[in-house]
Amino acid sequence: MTNKGSNSTILLWLAFVASLCGILLDIYNKTIVDGFVKALTTFKYFTLQSNLLVVLVSSGLLFLKEGKVKTIAKNYLGAVTSYILLTGIVYLIILEPIYELYGRERIASVLLHYVVPPAVLAYWLLNEKRRYQFKEILKWLCYPVIFMLWGLLLAFWFEDYLYPFFDIAQYGAFVAIYLVLVAIGFLAMILLLFFINNFYLTPHIPERRGK
């Protein structure tokens, strides 16, 4: 195994173990307070969802032989990379200053927000060989848009605010502005990954055009 291959394997294992341990620790922390069933509602948050996607993709790349399912994992690596990077960036800029976490909660947060995103990004930079087609941008955006609609649904019907920028009771119409900015952030991250992919990672591979 080359140094690049060895480093890639280490990064993939790091992403897999950190995301899985972070998720399990977060559920454990909430189980102690609210019970196991209620603790599972933690999966309504983007952090847990994006890290779960990392678990699924990384486990597929690590444990599956070449085949249809592993190909799916490879094809979704770029999209999942964009989601987990936004998880880390949004937490760092918006949420970290207003949340005070200690002990096990802090450990889970560090794993999910500060360990997994750079590990996935580094693995993506070293291993992405598929040249992206720009028509994929809309596909990548579907999940973040659906999540934001889901967040608005919870806010309007149940007064359950996933994140501060969903708090319509406090911010009113400004919530729409915040969500537009978040959507722009997602689009910018996706475009950045597409740019890196097309001009640096796979510049020699001609783009396949659909029929």
Image (cartoon, grey):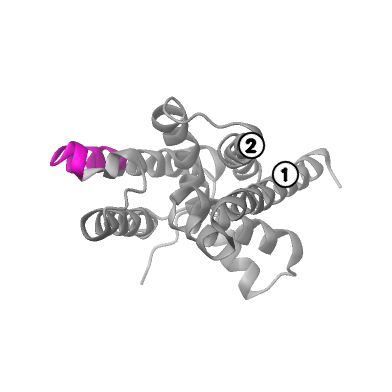
- The residue nearer to you, when weighing 190 against 94, is 94
In x, y percent, where is residue 108?
Answer: 62, 41
Residue neighbourhood size for the residue with mark 2, other residues' Cα within 10 Å, grouped as few (<14), some (14–19), many (≥20): some
Residue 119 in magenta? no
Q: Report whether residue 131 is seen.
A: no
- The residue nearer to you, when weighing 23 against 209, is 23
Q: Report the Cα–Cα distance between label 2 and label 1.
A: 8 Å
Three-letter amino acid code of the residue under disc 1: Leu
Q: Which residues are magenta?
A: 169-182
Residue 148 falls left or right of residue 124: left
Residue 194 falls left or right of residue 76: left
Q: Which mark is residue 111?
A: none
Please, what secondary structure does the residue beneath circle 1 have? Answer: helix
Mark 2–mark 1 contact, CB under 8 Å?
yes
Residue at left 61%, top 67%? 71
In x, y percent, where is residue 83?
Answer: 46, 48
In x, y percent, where is residue 211?
Answer: 36, 72
Please, what secondary structure does the residue beneath circle 2 have? Answer: helix
Image quadrant assignment for residue 18: top right
Q: Which mark is residue 14?
A: 1
Residue at left 29%, top 39%? 165
In the rendered image, the vertical position of residue 124 relative to residue 71, given as above or below: above
Q: Which residue is mark 2?
A: 115
Three-letter amino acid code of the residue under disc 2: Val
Residue 145 falls left or right of residue 1: left
In the rendered image, the vertical position of residue 103 relative to residue 12, given as above or below: above
- The residue nearer to you, when weighing 118 against 147, is 147
Residue neighbourhood size for the residue with mark 1, other residues' Cα within 10 Å, grouped as few (<14), some (14–19), many (≥20): some
